[in-house]
Amino acid sequence: MNYISGIICDLDGTLVESEELHLIAWNELVIRAGHQPPSPNWNDDCIGLPDTYAAAKTIGYFPEMGSADHVNAEKQVIYRELVAKKGRALAYPGLYDALARVRDAGIPLAVGTNSVLENTKAALEAAGLAEFFPVTVTLDQVERGKPAPDIYLEAARRLGVPPERCAVLEDSTAGLEAAHAAGCLVLGLTTTWPADKLVHADHIFSGTADALGWVLVQQEAARIPKMA
């Protein structure tokens, strides 16, 4: 394994416990428009994908709600309301301390997400995590979102680290595919999907703090000269 010189983290389901908030926001949007969601889990297949997928699906059910761009924009407003309300509870347990250890070890950090920049900033600030991520690459900053590799390739470029020396932390199947296609070391998290769904992961962890701890151990081991 190559020496890990950078870490790129997905946002939703990796740094912040917000995947459910996206689903709630879509349901709330439908309800505010005077409709009922088709089923409790009608949008689960859009987890980890750009919101354009969910927007298209929404107007497929409810064409009278307007254009995909309109419903997408309205959903983002609702999502940010939910994020602000949840505040620091958004961050996964133990994450702040784990990120502080990574920063102290001198490993640069970035966020690479299918969320748009405004939502990403809102979530990181509400969770108290913005200070750890000087680099953020969002859906609206690249040509293609996940599962294409563009977001992770751009994040590695901004970190100044070759993709193959970046560890990517991901919970979604689309994100894992993107990180794999970018040539990164792929650390899958079972925060959203079970381990058997994370087929593109090189290693699997139960949470982000555990994955970050593992990276620190690997980096320290790589620094120690091997005995002849």
Image (cartoon, rainbow, N blue to C red):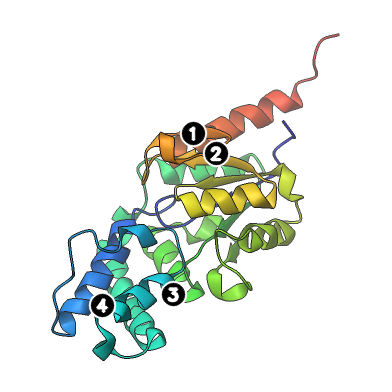
Query: Which residue was labeled with disc 4?
Result: 61
Coordinates of residue 140 in the picture (x, y in percent) = 55, 75
What's the CA distance linking mark 3 and mark 4? 14 Å
Most extreme residue toward the front, as rendered? 60
Coordinates of residue 39 in the picture (x, y in percent) = 17, 63
Query: Which residue was labeled with disc 3?
Result: 52
Does dot 4 land on a helix, a strand or a loop? helix
Residue type at the position of mark 1: Ile
Q: First in sequence, mark 1 or 4: give its number.
A: 4
| Pick the front one: 170 or 102 | 170
What's the CA distance linking mark 2 and mark 3? 25 Å
Residue 149, numbered circle: none
Residue type at the position of mark 2: Ala
The answer to whether mark 1 and mark 2 are in CB contact below 8 A is yes
What's the CA distance linking mark 1 and mark 3? 29 Å
Asked if one can make out residue 18 in the rendered structure from this viewpoint, the answer is no
Query: Which residue was labeled with disc 1?
Result: 204
Q: Given this view, does label 1 or label 3 mark the residue nearer the observer?
A: 3
Q: First in sequence, mark 3 or 4: give its number.
A: 3
